[in-house]
Image: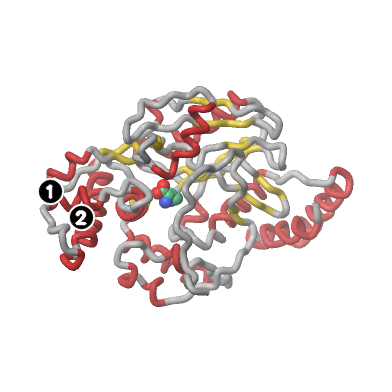
C-alpha cells in the first residue's frame, strides 16, 4: 500500500486527538517502517476508534452525524472463525438494541481482501419471496439475497416479515455459512396508529435497529470489508420508504383505504395524507414500544447543530443534498434551502461489490433527461 494515505490519516487523527509533534512523528516513522517491511500496517485501537468516528462524520448521505463522536467501536479484528464472527455479530445486535434505548455501535473485523465478508445488507432485515406470477411476499428489496439464503439450504416461513439469517464468509476462499439469528435478539415494533385503530389491521411491523453490514470502511489506506454499524431509525425511512415505495412494501393504497380516503382521484392527495399518517403511526408505535426513533424535524435540527459544530472546528460540512432532505415535507427543513458540497473525504464508508449475484429488477434510474 501507499504510505502517503496512512501518513495523511495519522496526521489528521493525531492532530484531532491533540497529540504532540513528537508522538505524531514517532508513529509516522513506525507506520512507514511497517509498510516498507510488510506492505501494510496495523491500526492501534485508538486509531481504529477515531477512524471509524471520522468515517461516520464524513458520510455525506447521513443526516444523523451530530452523534459521530458517540459511536462505540468494537475491535473484532481477532475474530477468525465463523463462530467467533457470529458471536461478535450477536453481541453487536444485543448491545446496540439495548432493550430499545439504541446505542450506535460499529464492530470492525479483520482488514484486507482476505478478511471476512458479511453477505447481508443489514444484520436484521426481512426476506422477500418472488412467486411465478410476479407477486412478492415480504420485502422486494431482499428477493435476490433471500434466493441466495434458500440456495444455501435456509427455508423461511414465507410470511411478510421473516427475519433473514446471517450469511457469513470468514475469508475470501471460504464457503458462506448460514446462521439463524435467535429471535430473542431481534426487537420488533408492531405498527398501530394512535387515532385510527384500523391501521393496526394491516399487520405491519418493523425491526428496531438498522445495522448496515454490506459497506466497507476505509481508514488511512486500510480497508475493512466487514464493519457493520448502526444508529437508530428516522421515521421516514420506515414510513415513507420501506412501507411506501412502490418497489418495497407498497402500502399507501392499503393505508388510504383504512383511513377512508378517496383513492379514485389523485388530487384528493390521498397518497400524501396516507404517507403522513403512516409516519405518525411509525413514530407513535416506536414511542409506545420504548424503542428509540427520531422524527425528521428533530433530525434536521440536529443536523443543523452538527453543521454549527463542524464550522466551529474549522471543518467543511460535506453532504449529499438529495439524501439529507427527508422524503416527507422536505422544504420544512433548512437543508432543503441550502447546498452541500458532495466531496468524498476519507476515512469513509464505501459500497463494495456484493459477494453474490444480484438478480434484482434494477430500480428506475434517477435523474437525467430521457431525451439526452
Ligand atoms: N434506510 C435504511 C432502512 O430503512 C437504513 C439506513 C441506515 N439508517 C439509519 N438510521 N442509521 O432500513
Residue topped by disc 2: 277
Label 2: few (<14), some or many (≥20) within 10 Å? many
The location of residue 38, given as percent across then percent down, is 85, 43
Is 35 situated left or right of 198 in this image? Answer: right
Q: Position of residue 308 (x, y in %)?
A: 46, 71
Q: Position of residue 20 (x, y in %)?
A: 73, 60
Which residue position is annotated with label 1? 196
Tell me if residue 131 comes above or below residue 219 in the rendering.
above
Image position of 194 (left or right of 91): left
Rendering quarter of residue 11: bottom right
Left or right for 141, reference 28: left
Give yes or no for contact between labels 2 and 1 (Cβ–Cβ under 8 Å). Answer: yes
Is residue 302 shown to the viewer in this render? yes
- Identify the residue shown where x is 36% and y is 63%: 326
Q: In the rendering, at what x and y percent does residue 219 appear?
A: 67, 52
Q: What is the C-alpha distance between the residues marked 2 and 1?
A: 9 Å
Res 207 seen here: no
Left or right side of 62 for 225? right
Nearest to the observer: residue 202 or residue 29: 202
Amino acid at each position: 500500500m501507499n504510505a502517503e494515505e496512512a501518513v495523511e490519516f495519522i496526521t489528521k487523527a493525531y492532530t484531532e486527538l491533540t497529540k504532540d509533534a513528537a508522538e505524531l512523528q514517532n508513529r509516522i516513522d513506525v507506520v512507514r517502517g511497517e509498510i516498507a517491511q510488510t506492505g501494510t500496517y496495523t491500526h492501534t485501537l485508538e486509531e481504529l476508534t477515531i477512524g471509524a468516528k471520522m468515517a461516520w462524520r464524513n458520510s455525506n448521505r447521513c443526516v444523523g452525524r451530530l452523534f459521530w463522536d458517540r459511536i462505540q467501536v468494537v475491535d473484532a479484528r481477532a475474530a477468525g472463525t465463523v463462530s467467533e464472527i457470529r458471536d461478535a455479530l450477536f453481541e453487536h445486535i444485543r448491545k446496540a438494541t439495548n432493550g430499545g434505548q439504541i446505542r450506535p455501535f460499529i464492530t470492525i473485523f479483520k482488514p484486507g481482501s482476505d478478511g471476512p465478508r458479511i453477505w447481508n445488507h443489514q444484520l436484521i432485515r426481512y426476506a422477500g419471496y418472488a412467486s411465478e406470477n410476479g407477486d412478492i411476499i415480504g420485502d422486494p428489496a431482499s428477493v435476490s439475497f433471500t434466493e441466495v439464503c434458500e440456495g444455501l439450504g435456509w427455508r423461511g416461513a414465507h410470511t411478510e416479515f421473516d427475519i433473514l439469517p446471517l450469511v457469513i464468509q470468514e475469508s475470501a476462499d471460504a464457503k458462506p455459512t448460514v446462521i439463524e439469528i435467535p429471535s430473542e435478539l431481534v426487537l420488533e415494533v408492531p405498527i398501530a396508529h394512535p387515532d385510527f385503530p384500523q391501521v393496526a389491521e394491516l399487520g405491519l411491523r418493523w425491526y428496531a435497529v438498522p445495522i448496515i453490514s454490506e459497506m466497507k470502511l476505509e481508514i488511512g489506506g486500510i480497508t475493512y470489508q466487514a464493519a457493520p454499524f448502526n444508529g437508530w431509525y428516522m421515521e421516514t425511512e420506515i414510513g415513507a420508504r420501506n412501507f411506501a415505495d412502490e418497489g418495497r412494501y407498497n402500502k399507501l393504497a392499503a393505508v388510504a383505504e383504512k383511513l377512508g380516503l378517496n383513492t379514485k382521484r389523485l388530487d384528493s392527495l390521498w397518497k400524501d395524507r396516507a404517507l403522513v399518517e403512516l409516519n405518525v403511526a411509525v413514530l407513535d408505535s416506536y414511542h409506545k414500544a420504548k424503542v428509540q426513533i427520531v422524527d425528521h424535524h428533530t433530525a434536521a435540527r440536529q443536523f443543523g447543530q452538527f453543521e454549527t459544530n463542524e464550522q466551529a472546528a474549522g471543518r467543511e460540512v460535506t453532504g449529499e443534498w438529495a439524501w439529507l432532505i427527508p422524503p416527507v415535507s422536505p422544504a420544512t427543513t433548512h437543508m432543503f434551502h441550502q447546498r452541500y458540497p458532495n466531496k468524498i473525504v476519507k476515512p469513509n464508508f464505501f459500497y463494495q461489490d456484493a459477494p453474490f449475484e444480484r438478480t434484482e429488477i434494477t430500480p428506475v434510474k434517477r435523474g437525467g433527461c430521457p431525451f439526452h
